[in-house]
């Protein structure tokens, strides 16, 4: 403190002894005024050992009122009677020590009137205003130290008390806020365990904060956020996203048994679980030995809405009877097939083929066999094949149990097909037919041009004991090694 007072006295003596003029020059008036401010700042600070802030320049607007410095700190006061002169092709701005003293007196008068009641109501504005006040007060303390003999002895004490007042006020307010907006009904919102109102700015210290929302009709909402200095946090929470988990079970059989967490419940009734701990609640639905199990996860907005279809023993027996109608029968299969020849690597420019397939299949339990024929054509292409079928089928899973989807009985089968045929394929670019690889009939030529060897996978959807719908896929292992896809009907006679 003695060092500061001594330095201030020294500067005061120098100023008055040398009738100092402060001057700043630049390429234009604005730069000249700014350099003037910097020069005043430098001279005073070099004498008072005050650390200089490159952005505040004492918070004094040394320029016109329309000039804006790169600083949030400012004062309403401006230097008056600045002289603008031309010097060595530069523009210079000067002010005398007398004018600087006048400014200091105005600052003292101004800052001593600062008080808490003059602060704005809005908290963020208060922080900004207090920062402005503190800048003015600190600058005024420095200037009064320079011109100490021109002010009453208690001036510095009064200014320091004023500075302490606003430093204490500044610690009470924060420059960043959190605002949580809630859509829907809720009971209580807390931030850092303090109850607050939704959709209202809560000014908090920078750092990590936690919040929670309690509601008797919703899961507990918990979260955290980080507030950074001068950066606000806002979020919107829809309580519909935090509904309690629930379960509703329906069934076509009204006497089906529904249990939830091993406790029997009623069908078609909504059961809300007022727990959101992310655990799992098991449930099951059963009817005449048929059982369906599941899990209800106890988390926000989790739900189970299921409608289970069961069949009586007589209905299951009828399904099994339909499947077993394939056990010992002769059926005519009439199928449409599509051969996408052009999708094959070596046949991009060849015509695709539409085909008609006829198979006379005899079934005996798991075995299926019989003759078949294919005829297909395009604009210029054609194929024909004669072959024999030998394969396996699945008509039952167990006693009175068949493979089905709902009430649709399914009989899957896999069949090998071997025989002879001819594929006459037309190239739409070269306008030529696929030619034989060899002029004479040999093993390679025979395999590529005449031998039929295929594998077929099919599904029969049984409509009744005499009619079934069929879908299939075939893979050719000879000729162009094509794939065929198709569908048809299966007729028993």
Image: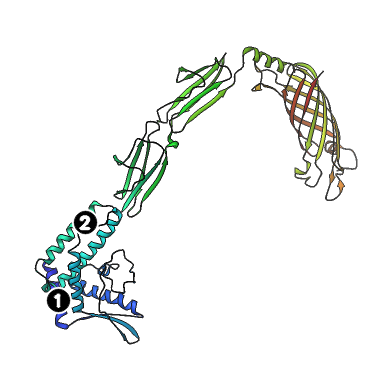
Question: Pointer 2: what residue?
Answer: 117
Pick the front one: 338 or 117: 117
Pick the front one: 72 or 383: 72
Which residue corresponds to the image point at 62% horizontal and 12% vertical from the top-left? 313
Local packing at callout 1 (Cα closer than 10 Å; few below 14, some 14-19, many 20+) is many
Q: Secondary structure at mark 1?
A: helix
Question: Pointer 1: what residue?
Answer: 12
Q: The N terminus is located in which quarter? A: bottom left
**Residue 356 point in image, percent of width and height:** 83, 32
Image quadrant of residue 404?
top right
Q: Residue furthest right?
A: 440
**Residue 88 point in image, percent of width and height:** 33, 87
Task: Check if mark 2's residue and mark 1's residue have beta carbons within 8 Å.
Answer: no
How is the protein colored in the picture? rainbow
Image quadrant of residue 336?
top right
Instruction: Tally the numbered discs.
Output: 2
Q: Secondary structure at mark 2?
A: helix
**Residue 58 point in image, percent of width and height:** 25, 69
Image quadrant of residue 480?
top right
N-terminal of the pair, mark 2 or mark 1, is: 1
The residues bearing labels 2 and 1 have C-alpha atoms spaced at a distance of 35 Å
- In this picture, residue 269 sits left or right of residue 224: right
Pick the front one: 361 or 131: 131
- 220 above or below 226? above
- 276 above or below 37? above
One can see residue 399 in this view: no
- 74 above or below 168? below
Which residue corresponds to the image point at 17% horizontal and 64% vertical from the top-left? 112
């Amino acid at each position: 403190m003695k060092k500061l007072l001594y330095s201030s006295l020294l500067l005061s003596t120098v100023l008055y002894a040398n009738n100092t003029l402060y001057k700043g020059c630049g390429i234009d008036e604005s730069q000249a005024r700014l350099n003037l401010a910097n020069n005043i700042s430098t001279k005073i600070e070099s004498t008072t050992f005050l650390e200089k802030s490159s952005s505040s320049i004492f918070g004094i607007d040394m320029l016109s009122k329309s000039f804006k410095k790169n600083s949030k700190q400012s004062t309403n006061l401006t230097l008056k009677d600045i002289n603008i002169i031309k010097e060595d092709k530069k523009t210079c701005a000067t002010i005398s020590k007398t004018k600087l003293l006048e400014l200091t007196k105005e600052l003292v008068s101004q800052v001593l009137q600062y008080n808490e009641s003059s602060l704005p109501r809005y908290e963020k504005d208060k922080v900004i205003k207090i920062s402005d006040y503190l800048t003015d007060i600190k600058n005024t303390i420095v200037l009064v130290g320079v011109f100490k003999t021109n002010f009453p002895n208690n001036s510095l004490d009064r200014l320091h008390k004023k500075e302490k007042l606003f430093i204490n006020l500044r610690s009470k307010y924060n420059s960043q806020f959190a605002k949580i907006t809630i859509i829907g009904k809720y009971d209580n919102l807390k931030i850092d365990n303090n109850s607050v109102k939704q959709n209202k700015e809560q000014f908090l210290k920078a750092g990590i904060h936690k919040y929670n929302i309690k509601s008797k009709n919703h899961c507990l909402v918990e979260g955290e956020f980080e507030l950074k200095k001068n950066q606000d946090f806002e979020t919107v929470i829809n309580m519909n996203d935090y509904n309690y988990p629930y379960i509703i079970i329906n069934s076509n059989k009204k006497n089906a048994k529904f249990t939830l967490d091993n406790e029997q419940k009623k069908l078609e009734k909504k059961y809300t679980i007022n727990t959101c701990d992310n655990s799992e609640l098991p449930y099951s639905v059963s009817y005449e030995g048929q059982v369906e199990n599941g899990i209800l996860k106890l988390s926000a907005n989790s739900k189970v809405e299921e409608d289970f279809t069961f069949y009586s023993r007589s209905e299951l027996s009828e399904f099994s009877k339909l499947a077993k109608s394939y056990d010992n029968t002769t059926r005519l299969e009439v199928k449409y097939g599509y051969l996408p020849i052009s999708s094959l690597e070596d046949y991009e420019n060849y015509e695709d083929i539409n085909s008609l397939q006829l198979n006379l299949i005899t079934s005996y339990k798991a075995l299926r066999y019989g003759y078949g024929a294919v005829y297909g054509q395009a604009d210029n292409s054609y194929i024909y094949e004669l072959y024999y079928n030998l394969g396996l089928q699945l008509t039952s899973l167990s006693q009175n149990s068949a493979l089905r989807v709902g009430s649709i009985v399914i009989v899957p089968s896999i069949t090998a097909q071997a025989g002879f045929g001819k594929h006459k394929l037309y190239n739409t670019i070269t306008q030529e037919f696929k030619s034989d690889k060899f002029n004479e009939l040999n093993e390679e030529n025979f395999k590529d041009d005449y031998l039929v060897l295929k594998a077929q996978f099919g599904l029969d959807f049984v409509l009744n004991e005499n009619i079934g719908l069929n879908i299939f896929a075939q893979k050719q292992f000879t000729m162009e090694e094509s794939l065929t896809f198709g569908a048809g009907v299966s007729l028993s006679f």
